[in-house]
Image (tube, rainbow, N blue to C red):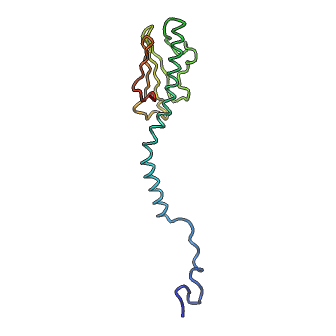
Amino acid sequence: MHSSATGACGRATEAARPARRGFTLVEITVVLAVVGILCAVAWPGLREPLLRSRRADAVTALTRIQIAQENHRALHGLYATQLGALSGATSTRSPEGLYEIELQRDGPARYEARAMARADGPMAGDSTCRVIRLQVREGIAEFAPTARCWNR
């Protein structure tokens, strides 16, 4: 009597077959598809906090300009026309280099500072807050385009 586990010579057929190791192509494809779907679902939820944290770079630069401008106004009676005239806020780039900084004066008691996302940087895709502005008129600050861009 031969059982189904033995071959013609009485050897076990399982011993003749090598042990199965690794994964099949179908298993790997299924895992990659599941991971891809999870990433597609999670990315929009992770993108906004990432953008908000990077916008802090622009907010820091514009806040430094605001403080330096108020110091300049206290000493000279008017706002500076160029970043180079400000103490502590002379760079045309934000601290982390994500934004280009620009200053325009609209008279002795008004100015606008802008932080523009660099075209070659990670914030170029931030369609909502690509340009963050600080407008000051006679000491009153307005934050544009929205409070959300200023992380408020």
Say which residue appears at 42% left-offset and 30% top-offset. 148
Quarter placement of the N terminus: bottom right
Asked where in the image residue 16 lies, by quadrant, the reply is: bottom right
> Is residue 90 rendered to the left or right of residue 26?
right
**Vertical order, 86 against 130 (above or below):** above
Residue 55 pos. (x, y %): 48, 30
> Is residue 58 rendered to the left or right of residue 11?
left
Say which residue appears at 57% left-offset and 80% top-offset. 14
Say which residue appears at 56% left-offset and 65% top-offset. 22
Residue at the far front: name it.
Answer: 152
Residue at the far top: name it.
Answer: 77
> Is residue 103 rendered to the left or right of residue 10?
left
Residue 101 pos. (x, y %): 49, 22
Residue 48 pos. (x, y %): 44, 37
Quarter placement of the C terminus: top left
Count the marks. 0
**Vertical order, 18 against 97 (above or below):** below
> Is residue 147 rendered to the left or right of residue 88?
left
Residue 28 pos. (x, y %): 49, 61
